[in-house]
């Protein structure tokens, strides 16, 4: 669920500050690591490290990140470890000099690793599948551009670039959105054939020409003053040259257009538009439908007030209160200096952070039957502790509503839901889940309702990846053996021992500190 951004500015104008600002807008998509790479006259400048954007970049780093083309990344660790060595972007020297930042997970990473090592003689330095993707692109691009020259100088043409992306799509499986820089040539962006992971591009007219941005969410572009042109379509590649010319081509065989529905449940900012669907409106729709279901099941309810779990439960709660004709109240104050607990690496850290993140307003709970509304329930960490907090400040009864269905299956496409053992809904009925989190009654959205109300705004979207809810893996390559192996490699216990020595990272940075 990482955040990526790519920029092509006017010649002679550095994009370092725009990249920094864009990453801060995308910080909600990953708070583990951040990185920026720029291209100045065919030379790469790179700074990356663990921490928030503001922790990684200081003035001295920004001054060295020169160039009118660049890419940036905020990391949320899924595949791989949380080592600094796996912060992105990654780069390789051949062909031309190639750098890449990636959002998503590759489901055939083991196959790609063997092919790269045994057939292409490529050295892979980390366990990150992003480094695998970069090297696959490097192999395919190198094989198609070998021998292309202009007046004796190495050269690459548009057809070779798009052909290389087509070959990547044919070899790689999973969900991925990428931005890449080819040193001295321009910016390349592409998206998996199903459009699982989001990617949009925008433009702005400036004195001296046109500037371009590609990003995980529209808000990162609009916040920088760019006009959103459209989503990068599934299987499409966009190349923007150093001179500011844009080329695009569909580079994959047609596949169902099925973006990730969890973007609209939790991940994306509400002010983003993803795949032509307003995240804000989708969450209102989810709340409205859930309220209708509640009324169908429980006409004589005794709910006094609807209270959201900030921030991602707020819109669903607001619409639920309106549909139920019940007062809406803000009952929790969020500490803005504690990050999103869902994307924290490890259950122990998440558990410790919940009470630091939220504080209850007693007068909104005391003596009342409250309906708490959240975007989803995954591990149950937040839900259980918040219900306890509500009771501690005097709530008579605590009901709970989830705008998403029960999470019962691993997500393999870039969301940290690798193992069913960590899901509170695993092998439990709704009543059993309710008892576990301590609620007096629990309401879930149905899968059918979630998909219907989320997809209303864009008929071009043929469906959604909802695999964590329904167990249907749209890439068609996931079986029980894969899920078992994934669970062993990426559960919390495995991650706790996966931290690597960070001393090698300075090989990739301009300077120390």
Image (cartoon, helix red, strand yellow):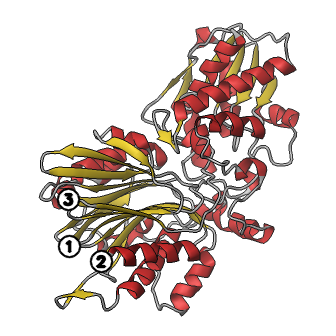
The quarter of the picture where the C terminus appears is bottom left
**Residue 23's mark?**
none
**In this image, 443 relative to 202: left or right?**
right
Which is more toward the observer, 45 or 473?
473
The residue positioned 70% from the left and 59% from the top of the image is: 474
* Residue corresponding to mark 1: 42
The picture places residue 479, in percent across and down from the top left corner, at: 77, 68
Does 316 sit left or right of 480 as displayed?
left
Relative to residue 166, is residue 307 depicted above or below?
above
First in sequence: mark 1 vs mark 3: 1
Point 16% across, 89% down: residue: 151
Residue 97, labelled with which disc? 2
Image spot of residue 293 (x, y percent) = 79, 24
Residue at 55% of width from left, 23% of height from top?
359
- The residue located at (63%, 52%) in the rendering is 258
Count up the numbered dots. Answer: 3
What distance separates the C-alpha of mark 3 from that of mark 2?
16 Å
Which residue is under mark 3? 68
- Please tell me which residue lies in front, 155 or 113: 155
* Circle 2: element type: loop
In which image quadrant can residue 153 be found? bottom left
Mark 1–mark 3 Cα distance, whole angstroms, equals 11 Å
Give me the C-alpha separation between circle 1 and circle 2. 8 Å
Q: Is residue 25 visible?
A: no
Q: Is residue 340 visible?
A: yes
Numbered disc 3: secondary structure: loop
Depicted 382 relative to depicted 166: above or below: above
Please give left or right for residue 418 compared with residue 100 in the image: right
Is label 1 in contact with label 2 (beta carbons under 8 Å)?
A: yes
Give the SS element for disc 1: loop
Question: Which quadrant of the structure image shows residue 365?
Answer: top right
Assess disc 3: are there few (<14), some (14-19) or many (≥20) residues with their C-alpha within 10 Å of its C-alpha: many
């Amino acid at each position: 669920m990482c955040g990526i951004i790519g920029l092509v500015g006017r010649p002679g104008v550095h994009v370092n500050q725009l990249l920094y600002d864009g990453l801060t807008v995308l910080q909600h998509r990953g708070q583990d690591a951040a990185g920026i790479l720029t291209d100045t006259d065919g030379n790469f400048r790179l700074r990356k490290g663990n921490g928030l954007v503001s922790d990684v970049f200081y003035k001295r780093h920004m001054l060295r990140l020169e160039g009118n083309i660049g890419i940036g990344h905020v990391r949320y660790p899924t595949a791989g470890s949380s080592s600094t060595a796996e912060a992105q972007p990654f780069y390789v020297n051949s062909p031309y000099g190639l750098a890449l930042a990636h959002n998503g997970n590759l489901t055939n990473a083991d196959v790609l690793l063997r092919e790269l090592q045994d057939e292409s003689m490529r050295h892979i330095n980390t366990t990150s599948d992003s480094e695998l993707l970069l090297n696959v692109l490097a192999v395919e691009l190198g094989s198609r551009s070998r021998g292309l020259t202009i007046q004796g100088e190495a050269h690459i043409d548009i057809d070779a670039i798009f052909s290389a992306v087509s070959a990547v799509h044919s070899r790689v499986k999973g969900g991925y959105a990428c931005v890449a820089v080819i040193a001295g040539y321009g910016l390349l962006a592409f998206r998996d054939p199903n459009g699982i992971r989001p990617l949009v591009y925008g433009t702005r007219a400036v004195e001296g020409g046109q500037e371009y941005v590609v990003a995980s969410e529209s808000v990162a572009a609009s916040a920088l003053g760019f006009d959103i042109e459209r989503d990068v379509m599934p299987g499409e590649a966009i190349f923007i040259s150093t001179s500011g010319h844009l080329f695009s081509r569909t580079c994959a065989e047609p596949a169902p257009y099925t973006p990730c529905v969890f973007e609209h449940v939790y991940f994306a900012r509400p002010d983003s538009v993803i795949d032509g669907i307003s995240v804000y409106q989708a969450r209102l729709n989810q709340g409205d439908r859930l309220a209708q279901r509640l009324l169908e099941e429980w006409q004589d309810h005794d709910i006094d007030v609807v209270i959201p779990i900030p921030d991602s439960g707020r819109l669903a709660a607001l619409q639920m209160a309106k549909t139920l004709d019940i007062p809406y109240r803000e009952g929790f104050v969020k500490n803005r200096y504690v990050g999103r607990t869902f994307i924290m690496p490890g259950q122990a850290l998440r558990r410790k952070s919940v009470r630091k993140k939220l504080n209850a307003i007693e007068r909104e709970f005391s003596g009342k039957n409250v309906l708490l509304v959240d975007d989803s329930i995954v591990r149950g960490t937040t839900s259980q502790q918040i219900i306890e907090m509500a009771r501690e400040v005097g709530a008579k009864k605590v009901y709970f509503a989830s705008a998403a269905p029960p999470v019962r299956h691993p997500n393999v496409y870039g969301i940290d839901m690798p193992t069913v053992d960590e899901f509170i809904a695993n092998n439990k009925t709704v009543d059993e889940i309710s008892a576990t989190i301590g609620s007096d009654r629990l309401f879930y959205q149905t899968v059918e309702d979630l998909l219907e109300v989320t997809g209303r705004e864009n008929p071009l979207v043929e469906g959604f990846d909802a695999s964590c809810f329904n167990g249907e893996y749209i890439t068609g390559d996931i079986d029980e053996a894969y899920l078992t192996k994934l669970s062993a490699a990426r559960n919390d216990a495995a991650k706790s021992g996966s931290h690597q020595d960070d001393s090698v990272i300075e090989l990739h940075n301009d300077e120390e500190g």
